[in-house]
Amino acid sequence: MDQNAGSFVAVRRLSGAGAVHHHRHHSSPGTRVASSLTVTIFTPFPFRAPAAEVVGVSTAWIGRGLSCVCAQRRDSEARLSFDLTAIQEECLHRLQNRIEVQYDSSNLEHQKALKALWRASFPGTELLGLVSDQWKDMGWQGKDPSTDFRGGGYISLENLLYFSKNFPKSFQELLGKKNGDRALWEYPFAVAGVNITFMLIQMLELQAAKPKSLIGAVFLNLLKENDRAFDILYCITFKLMDQKWLDMHASYMDFNSVIKSTRRQLERELLLEDIQRIEDMPSYRFLAR
C-alpha cells in the first residue's frame, strides 16, 4: 500500500480491563485524522457521512457499556462493530419486533389506533370512515391512510399516536402549522411523520443484529434506560425537523434537504458527552406538553 497514504485509528476496548488500545493502519489518501479518539466510519445508508470521512469521537463514550471493535477489510474500509449486553439485546429485539409489524387495515387493533389518532388530531370532529377525504386534512396523500404506512409500518402510526398523547401542544402546533412564517407549499404532516420513522430506523441501524456505527450503539444505551426512547426521539426529530424547515425557509420540494439537515443535527447531539438519557438531548427542550 502507498506509504504516503493517510491513516486512521482503530479502537478496541479490552473486556474487563477498561483500557483503550490504539492501532494505526494505513488508509486511502486524503483521509483526515481528527483530534482526540478517531475512527473511520463507512455506511451504505443514504444521508450519512461519505466514505473516507473521519469522525471525531470523545473517549468518554468508550466505557459506557460500549465494547467496540474496528475491523480492517480487504477493500481498505473500516467498520465498527459493537458487542451488546444481554439487556441491550433484549431492548433491541423488542424494538425490532415493533418495526417488523406492517399496518393491516383489517386488524381491529390497528383500526382502533388510527381512530385514536384522528380523535387526538381533531377532537370534536366526527370521523366519517377509515377511508375518507377527511384524512387529507391530516396530511395523508389520499383518503386511505393505510396506503401511506407501507414505508414506515405500524410503528409509524404508533409514533404519531405517542406524539399526540405525550406532547399534544407541539403535536397540534405542527399539525396546524401554527408557528413561524410558513411556505405556500407546506410539507404534509402525516406523510412527513412516516418518513421520519423510516429515517430514524435507517440512521440507528435498527434492523441489524447489532449496530455498526457509534450512533446506533449510543442509542441502544439510551433505549436501555428508557424503553420509549425511540418514540421520544421521534417526537424530538419531528419538532426539530419543523424548526429546520422554518430556518431554511423551505418549501415542499426542499423536504429531503431538511431531512438531511435534521439527521446531521441528531447525530451531533447523540454524540455529546453529557447525553445520559434521551431527554438530555438539547433539542428535547423544543417539545411542549
Image (tube, rainbow, N blue to C red):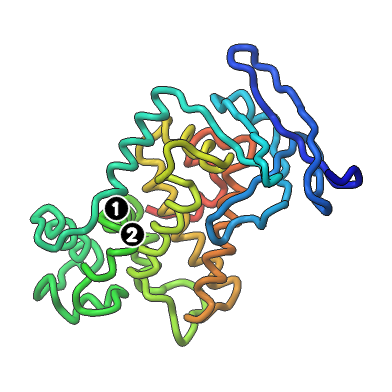
Image location (x, y in percent) of residue 6: 84, 46
Residue 229 visible to an observer of this rendering: yes
Residue 126 visible to an observer of this rendering: no
Residue at mark 1 to residue at mark 2: CA–CA distance: 7 Å
Residue drawn at (72%, 52%) of the image: 52
Q: Which residue is mark 1?
A: 155
Residue drawn at (29%, 64%) of the image: 150
Residue drawn at (29%, 74%) of the image: 140
Amino acid residing under circle 2: Gly
Quadrant position of the N terminus in the picture: top right
**Foreground pick, 89 / 237:** 89
**Foreground pick, 243 / 144:** 144
Image location (x, y in percent) of residue 135: 22, 75
**Foreground pick, 17 / 280:** 17
Image location (x, y in percent) of residue 35: 81, 40
Amino acid residing under circle 1: Ile
The reply to whether discs 1 and 2 touch (Cβ–Cβ < 8 Å) is yes
Secondary structure of residue under mark 2? loop
Secondary structure of residue under mark 1? helix
Answer with the quarter of the image where residue 118 lies.
bottom left
Q: Which mark is residue 152?
A: 2
Of all residues shown, which one is farthest toward the right? 4
In this rendering, is residue 160 above or below 62? below
Residue drawn at (24%, 79%) of the image: 142
Of all residues shown, which one is farthest toward the top? 17
- The answer to whether residue 81 is left or right of residue 7 is left
In this rendering, is residue 18 above or below 101? above
